[in-house]
Image (cartoon, rainbow, N blue to C red):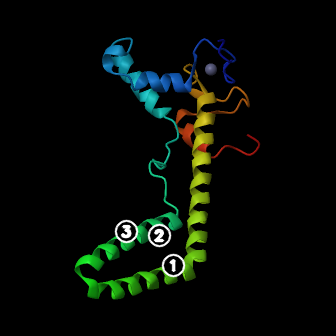
Amino acid sequence: MTKPNCPQCQKSDRVEKVSTIYVQGIKPDAELPGDKAAQNALRTLSQRLAPPAGKGQGLTRPIHPDLMVGGFTAIVILIIYNMAASQLQMVLPAAVLAALALVIYALTRKKIIARFEKKQNNEGGSQKKAEAAVGRWMQLYYCGRDDLAFNPLTKASMPPEAVRSYCVDPPPGE
Ligand SMILES: [Zn+2]
């Protein structure tokens, strides 16, 4: 694949993909080319070109409130059922309490669901944003002559330190 020309020096001989440099720089010492100084330089550059970080979310899927209440109800019914065998006098109060809890949930359900869905939408939005930011980062190149990162599609260029903010919050029209 031919590399794009740097918008500063108009050459491509010192151009490398930002993501390639970054991945190189996080490899173990033994896999890095050059002497110690060259390796250190690569590591430093790699860190300067690091991708925009996600928020580390999305590991756990939030449980829908209805599902949660349904699960608790099943457990409570099981407990009450077991009570019937050993503690018959407790069955009625327990059943009344459980029914009361369900009534309260039914009354507040609309609000709880609305809050849940709002949160879901927000997280979906920021997830999309993070994905778009990494997508932009994947398109960037870096010119070693000018110490400049650039987007070959839009010719936008920036110092390595500005790569993350460029990806997260690109200028209008990109
Ligand atoms: Zn250049």
The kind of secondary structure element at disc 1 is: helix
Of the 4 image quadrants, the one containing the C terminus is top right
What count of labels does the image hold?
A: 3
Q: Which residue does the numbered mark 1 point to in the structure image?
A: 105
Up-down relation of residue 37 to residue 64 (above or below): above
Quarter containing ligand 1? top right
Q: Specify the farthest residue to the right.
A: 173
Q: Quadrant of residue 83?
A: bottom left
Q: Which residue does the numbered mark 3 point to in the structure image?
A: 75
The kind of secondary structure element at disc 2 is: helix
Q: Amino acid type of disc 2?
A: Val
Q: Position of residue 53 (x, y in %)?
A: 49, 42
- Residue 167, visible in the rendered structure: no
Of residues 32 and 6, the one nearer the viewer is 32
| Earlier residue among tags 2 and 1 | 2
- Left or right side of 139 for 62: left
Of residues 23 and 33, the one nearer the viewer is 23
Q: Quadrant of residue 34?
A: top left
C-alpha separation, residue under disc 2 versus residue under disc 3: 10 Å
Is there CB contact under 8 Å for labels 2 and 1? yes
Up-down relation of residue 92 to residue 81 (above or below): below
C-alpha separation, residue under disc 2 versus residue under disc 1: 8 Å
The kind of secondary structure element at disc 3 is: helix
